[in-house]
Image (cartoon, rainbow, N blue to C red):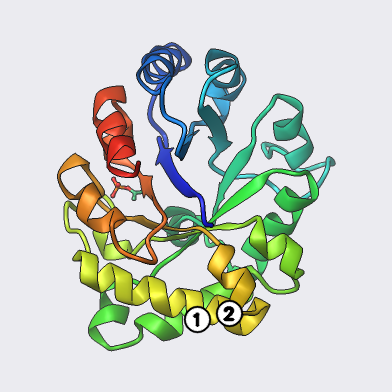
Amino acid sequence: MRKTVIAGNWKMYKTNKEAVEVLTQLKDLTKDVSTVDIVIGAPFTCLSDAVKAVKGSNVKIAAENVYPKEEGAYTGEVSPKMLKDIGVEYVILGHSERREYFGETDEFINQKVKAVLEYGMTPIFCIGEKLEDRESGKTLDVNTRQIKGGLAGLSQEEAKKVIVAYEPVWAIGTGKTATPEMAQETHKEIRNVLAEMFGKDVAEEITIQYGGSMKPENAKDLLSQADIDGGLVGGASLKADSFFEIIKAGK
Ligand code: PEP
């Protein structure tokens, strides 16, 4: 049985104080939720206090990036060992903003996925096509390349621990959402690629989230699709009440 995982991605928003305030509200709102795993991805500066703010609750904390080395002369970077040390449990990897603005390649993301797994944390591994890919019929090619590159060399046991977040780039932060049917079709294709790589049984166990302008108004329709097992939510995760509405839609 796949887990439903609703994760927020706060990107480069929130001071430490703002983060703790929203997490304290969210902790309270979600105290009776038991059927959905709840995650918030917060900036590095908030992570330590974020973990403390949600301690003993249903809310878990994600980092939004990591450098795939244990330690070393990598000025400005943060290692998986450091994240693990402060109680971070998930790491968002390969987000389209990192691919686009920071030139992250499938190969580099693959190193990060492996490093996060090695430290016993859960990668939220993002993939997704751009508008021009979809319009030129390359959606499946692009997603297949990103999955095969990003998850290369993982064992079946490792693959089961990964969360895949399908985020059509044209739907992120634009207010445009894939229709539930369109998203379902792509999720099914993604699961087929995972089955090709790791076997059908493993693919059936992997949580595949949808991301791209998910909000309280459209979450239920998206989350009721057979292969949509959760959401990665940007804008609508910044406030506890709107994020809670999405969590309720996933129950
Ligand atoms: C995201 O940042 O991963 C995202 C899906 O953003 P939004 O929900 O704002 O489109």
Residue at coordinates 29% horizontally, 68% vertically from top-left?
Answer: 183
Judging by the rendered image, the residue that carries numbered circle 1 is 192
Label 2 neighbourhood size at 10 Å, few (<14), some (14-19), many (20+)?
some
> Which of the image's four quarters has the C terminus?
top left
Left or right position of 221 against 96: left
Q: Say left or right for 21 vs 79.
A: left
Please name the residue shown 62% across and 20% down the image. Answer: 48
In the rendered structure, are the residues bearing label 1 and label 2 in contact, judged by CB atoms less than 8 Å apart? yes
Vertically, is 157 above or below 220? below
When the figure is inspected, residue 110 is found, relative to residue 172, above or below; the finding is below
The amino acid type, in three-letter code, at marker 2 is Ala
Instruction: State the image coordinates of residue 109 (x, y, percent, origin top left).
Output: 62, 61
Label 2 secondary element: helix
Q: Could you tell me how many numbered marks the image carries? A: 2
Residue 248's spot in the image, x, y percent?
30, 36
Q: Is mark 2 within 8 Å of ligand 1?
A: no
Packing grade of label 1 (10 A; few <14, some 14-19, many >=20) is some
Counting from the top left corner in percent of width and height, residue 14 is at 39, 23
In this rendering, the answer to whether 237 lies above or below 195 is above
Local SS, label 1:
helix
> Residue 168: x, y in percent?
33, 65
Q: Name which residue type carries label 1.
A: Asn
**In the image shown, does 32 or 67 lie closer to the viewer?**
32
Q: Horizontal placement of 103 versus 228: left or right?
A: right
* Mark 1 lies within 8 Å of ligand 1 (Cβ measured): no
98 sits to left or right of 140: right
Residue appearing at x 58%, y 67% in the figure? 105
- Residue bearing mark 2: 195
Distance, label 1 to label 2, CA atoms, is 5 Å
Residue occupying the far front of the picture: 1
| Tag of residue 33 | none
